Amino acid sequence: MWDAQVASVAALFADRARARMLVALIDGRSLPASRLAAEAGVTPATASSHLGRLVEAHLLAVESSGRHRFYRLADERAARVIEDLAAMTDLPPITSLRDGTRANRLRTARSCYDHIAGRLGVAIMRALVADGVLVPVGHAGIARRPADPLSAPLPDRPYALGSKAADGLAAWGVDLRSVEAAGRPTLRFCMDWTEQCHHLGGGLGAALLTSARGAGWLVDGPRRRELVVTDAGREFFDRVAAQPDSAASGS
Amino acid sequence: MWDAQVASVAALFADRARARMLVALIDGRSLPASRLAAEAGVTPATASSHLGRLVEAHLLAVESSGRHRFYRLADERAARVIEDLAAMTDLPPITSLRDGTRANRLRTARSCYDHIAGRLGVAIMRALVADGVLVPVGHAGIARRPADPLSAPLPDRPYALGSKAADGLAAWGVDLRSVEAAGRPTLRFCMDWTEQCHHLGGGLGAALLTSARGAGWLVDGPRRRELVVTDAGREFFDRVAAQPDSAASGS
DNA sequence: CGCACCGTTCGGTCCCGATCGAAATGTGCG
DNA sequence: CGCACATTTCGATCGGGACCGAACGGTGCG
């Protein structure tokens, strides 16, 4: 029963044209159908068929605006699957020693959907916990019985905002209140495939990335989704977080 | 250029028969081709063709033994993709509040091959660590073993038996000595996709499940691999472990 | 050695779905 | 209203690949 679903979902990614469209959307943009047709190199008719299937499968979300219809990835899970599929192709079978500059740079810092992933993302996460901005909940011994069984599945929210969150985030150039006012879930977490830890997503994750870009700590790298830590950024992260960079610190 | 690779890898998962085989292997077992053909419901000829493609893509690893050839997942990435694909199907588009009894029950307790997985599995694991039955070893610093793709299933051995293991296990109705005498590896660990933690497999995991069934703490549910926590079981687990919550089921 | 069995290779059939052109729907604009 | 443009629907074509039966190498066993 599992297998049929796995196969049918995988089939959505298994077509070149669809894969092109999905990859084009992986950074979180919303693009109109015509643009996606061009990206995929197919006629509007074909593209429309594909887009319809992807929306029906809840893989894409669509928003009508005038005579355009803008498509975007429905959620981070879609981005994650694409990322994992791509990860399978890169390295041969097993992580070799010199899997090269490319994968390694990607591991150091990259954007995941619209927030910071990679080692830097994990390091930031740790720093936020250390500062009390985030506090782990229900991780180890804490019984979560009183909570009703349907809410808050464990993997989703292993952390909550601490009492000093607002103050702590100010140091990062993030105004917590406006993030919370944005109407998007503030806290969300992704598992990172390079490090086996959570990194921060959601509204707060996005705000942090925005702030880091604005402050000049991070700039976009030559490749899609690649983030480069500037000198100023390194100085900052070294001070505030324990930024690993070149040397790997045990996760 | 990314997209082509994504599509071609995804295509490997996009066939029902292949998906069945991969799902059958997801717990880390090694199975002979004939068994996989049966699992997939195809003739040996067809299965062989599929298996060849999967090996060529470094998705499966194969080991010849006598006149059998045993296939297993090549590494964790393959398992992760399967899990992610499955995760996409469960919940509708966005993690809604009531993402439903089904996925949630699935997460609570289920059997994985012959041991207990899901939240209950993870909770038991934690309790065993807390009691000193298991002690974590080399979690962080130990270098990954040199490329040796042929040995031991994917998950490493992050835990070893503690000195008070035998006493601690007695409370669970498990006789450690007879488990070790059974000639099967006592300790083995699986990564769980619902919780991102290890749960206990191997001979000891199997013994725990047997014991829990015998004591009436768990009974098999209507679906395959579904485990239901009885009242007596709840009482016991509440006392010994920090058991998460209510009903249970699995896939 | 010969038989039984596991697994792979080969050749041929058949179906699903990706694609396009043409036509239909729907929206914005003058 | 009528034209321009974005998008979707329809019908038809065509190729890739999933599948099987049969034949072909190995391996174990008596």
Image: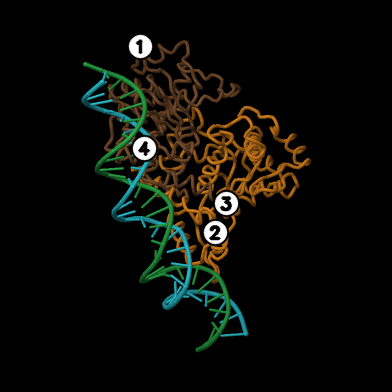
Chain colours: A orange, B brown, C cyan, D green
Q: CA distance from mark 4 to mark 3?
A: 35 Å
Badge 3 marks a residue whose secondary structure is loop
State the image quarter where residue A58 is shown.
Answer: bottom left
Q: CA distance from mark 1 to mark 4?
A: 37 Å
| Residue A251 versus residue A69 in the image, above or below | above
Q: Amino acid at mark 3?
A: Ile
Q: CA distance from mark 1 to mark 3?
A: 52 Å
Q: Are marks 4 and 3 in contact (CB under 8 Å)?
A: no
Q: Amino acid at mark 1?
A: Ala
Q: Which residue is mark 2?
A: A40
Q: Which residue is mark 3?
A: A26
Chain of the residue under label 4: B
Q: Position of residue A216 (x, y in %)?
A: 75, 47
Q: Which residue is mark 1?
A: B181
Q: Position of residue B153 (x, y in %)?
A: 45, 26
Q: Earlier in the sequence, mark 3 or mark 2?
A: 3
Q: Amino acid at mark 4?
A: Ser
Q: Which residue is mark 4?
A: B48
Q: CA distance from mark 3 to mark 2?
A: 14 Å
Check chain identity for marks 4 and 3: say if they share one: no
